[in-house]
Amino acid sequence: MIGGLRPLAARDVSHGARSHGYAAFVAAAGVEGFVVRPATAADEKFIAEVYATTREEELRQVAWTDAQKRAFTDWQSAQQERHYATHYPDAERLILVAVAADGAATHVGRIYVDTTPADVRLMEMTLLPAWRNRGIGSRLLEQVIAYADRLGRDASLHVEPFNPAKRMYERAGFAVVETRGLYEFMVRPAPILRGGFRS
């Protein structure tokens, strides 16, 4: 167990999750001590808070007040959510919740996954700073890969070249296949079965 958190059980997943998809796979396979549930309109403030943590280092260089910085990141977060809704309408946008042994729940981050006939795209995986560097991101990434392998599809993602998470993706078998604007597109191919066929 991680930090006294209990294992995830299938019944923990919100009823809003797909019966087939990444959330359902996580419910069946288990991510120790965590629940994933679909994001709702009520999560807008939390999602903006998570997004803001990804811009903190950059905004330290800007002579804005804290209020101005927050107004900017709130706007950017809303723009990002609209982009995802427009370009990935069928994606699973999930909130990651840590559940303690006494049942207390704490929102710790978000993970967005889009399942297509071609691949499983990890669109977004961000934890609040207090929950980083504890192996949680690696566990979630393992589940994305296992889910893609179950479907016999590549796992893919976009990452900024300077993002520290890129090293984690490389260790998991992802490799850069092309540069797309400011981002590198990384792919972890589906496994090859005996006889040269992909799973």
Image: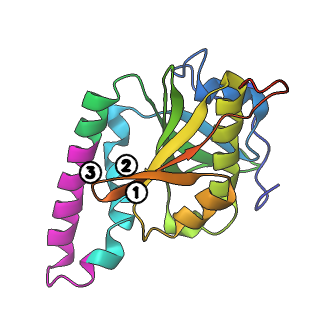
Please provide the residue range marked out in magenta. Answer: 59-80
* Residue on which disc 1 sits: 50
- Circles 3 and 2: CB distance less than 8 Å? yes
Q: Position of residue 76 (x, y in %)?
A: 21, 54
Give me the C-alpha separation between circle 1 and circle 2.
5 Å
At label 2, the amino acid type is Ile
Label drawn at residue 77: 3
* Residue on which disc 2 sits: 47
In this view, the residue in front, 146 or 5, is 146
- 159 lies above or below 38: below
Q: Position of residue 105 (x, y in %)?
A: 61, 47
- 198 lies above or below 190: above
For the N terminus, give its image quadrant.
Answer: bottom right
At label 3, the amino acid type is Ser
Give me the C-alpha separation between circle 3 and circle 2.
7 Å
Residue under the image location 27 percent in, 55 percent down: 181
